[in-house]
Image (spheres, rainbow, N blue to C red):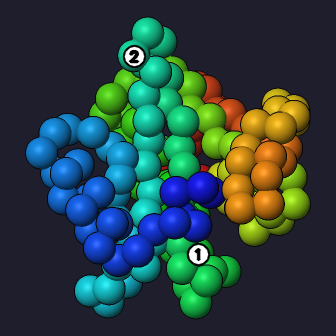
Amino acid sequence: MWWAERSTIDTTRAFIEAALTDDRLDPLGIVVEGELVGVIGADADVITGNHAIGYWIGSAYEGQGYVTRACFALLDHLFSVLGCHRVAIKAGTENARSRAIPERLGFVREGVERGGGRGSRGYHDLVVYSMLEDEWSPNA
C-alpha cells in the first residue's frame, strides 16, 4: 500500500493520534505484547453506509493470524454493532497472504479491479472481495 511504503514510526504515530479525536474506525492499531505491529481500518461510504477494510502488518508478524483476528473483530463490530450491510476488502492479485485473509473469513470474490492499486512499482490489479450482513457469522 502506498501509505505503508512511506510510513515512519513518527508519521504512523501522528496519524493514529489524529484519528483518536473522532469516532472513525481508521486507523486502529494491531498491538502484540504492547508493541504496535500493524494497522487495520474500516472506511465508510457516507452514502451507503458500507465499509471497506484495509490492513498492513510488519513483515516479522506476517503469517501468525494477527490480521485475520483483527479483521474478525472489526467485522463483528461493523455487522453486529453498526448494522453495516456490506464490507469489501481489496488485495493485490500477486499478494497471496493478503488475499488469503478474506478467503479465510468467507468473503466472496467478486472480480479483479484492473489497475486499481498503486505502489512503489506503479499500478497493479486488485482482487475485490465482499461480505454481506446476512453472510456474517460471528461463530465461524
Mark 2 or mark 1, which is nearer the start of the sequence?
2
Q: Residues within 10 Å of mark 1 (few under 14, many from 20)?
A: few
Q: Residue at x 56, y 25 (%)?
A: 86
Q: Is residue 21 left or right of residue 119?
A: left
Q: Secondary structure at mark 2?
A: loop
Q: Is residue 139 above or below residue 51?
A: below
Q: Is residue 77 above or below residue 8?
A: above
- Residue 98 numbered mark, or none: none
Q: Residues within 10 Å of mark 2 (few under 14, many from 20)?
A: few
Q: Is residue 117 above or below residue 94?
A: above
Residue pointed to by mark 1: 65
Q: Residue at x 35, y 53 (%)?
A: 27
Residue 135 place in picture, x, y as percent: 63, 32
Residue 8 place in picture, x, y as percent: 41, 74
Q: Is residue 78 left or right of residue 22?
A: right
Residue situated in front as seen by the camera: 74 or 46? 46
Kind of residue indicated by mark 2? Val
Q: Secondary structure at mark 1?
A: loop
Residue 133 place in picture, x, y as percent: 54, 27
Residue pointed to by mark 2: 46
Label 1 to label 2: alpha-carbon separation: 31 Å
Would residue 2 be visible to someone looking at this image? yes
**Residue, far top:** 47
Residue 84 place in picture, x, y as percent: 44, 25
Q: Is residue 77 left or right of residue 48?
A: left
Q: Residue at x 34, y 66 (%)?
A: 12
Kind of residue indicated by mark 1? Gly
